[in-house]
Amino acid sequence: MRVTTGTAISGEVVLDDPSLTDGTDILAVTREREEEARLSPEELVELEAGIAEADRDKMISGEEFFARLRRYE
């Protein structure tokens, strides 16, 4: 898993990383917000802990990330 950026143009996402091959699965997250995100104190603590882990290079694999996301489906 890797992170890249891009831009939506005429309804299509144009990525800044031209090395991605055709058929690569993409997860897109936009920066625009329709409404503010409101976090509970517990969620804020969890978010801050995750940011601190990332700052210390303690990250999980892409597979583990998506497995955790599936819990919320």
Image (spheres, helix red, strand yellow):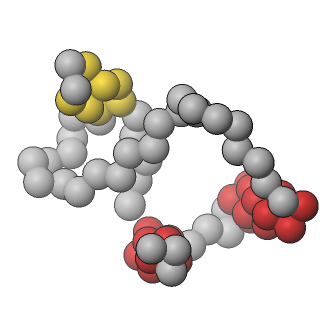
Residue 65, x across and y down, in percent = 50, 71
Residue 56, x across and y down, in percent = 75, 61
Residue 4, x across and y down, in percent = 40, 40
- The part of the image, by quadrant, that contains residue 39 is bottom right
Q: Name the quadrant of the C terminus.
A: bottom left
- Which residue is drawn at the image coordinates 77% and 48% (left, top)? 38
The answer to which of 45 and 34 lies nearer the viewer is 34
- In the displayed structure, 46 sits above or below 51; it is below
- Which residue is drawn at the image coordinates 21% and 41% (left, top)? 19
- In the displayed structure, 66 sits above or below 47; it is below
Q: Is any atom of residue 46 visible in this view?
A: yes
Q: Residue furthest front?
A: 35
The answer to which of 50 and 69 lies nearer the viewer is 69
Number of numbered discs on residues: 0
The answer to which of 40 and 62 lies nearer the viewer is 40
Q: Residue furthest top?
A: 10
Left or right: 59 with respect to 13?
Answer: right
Q: Is any atom of residue 56 visible in this view?
A: no
Left or right: 57 with respect to 66?
Answer: right
Residue 12, x across and y down, in percent = 21, 29
- Which residue is drawn at the image coordinates 25% and 19% (left, top)? 9
Q: Name the quadrant of the N terminus.
A: bottom left
- Which residue is drawn at the image coordinates 64% and 35% (left, top)? 35
The answer to which of 47 and 21 lies nearer the viewer is 47
Q: Residue furthest right?
A: 41
- The part of the image, by quadrant, that contains residue 53 is bottom right
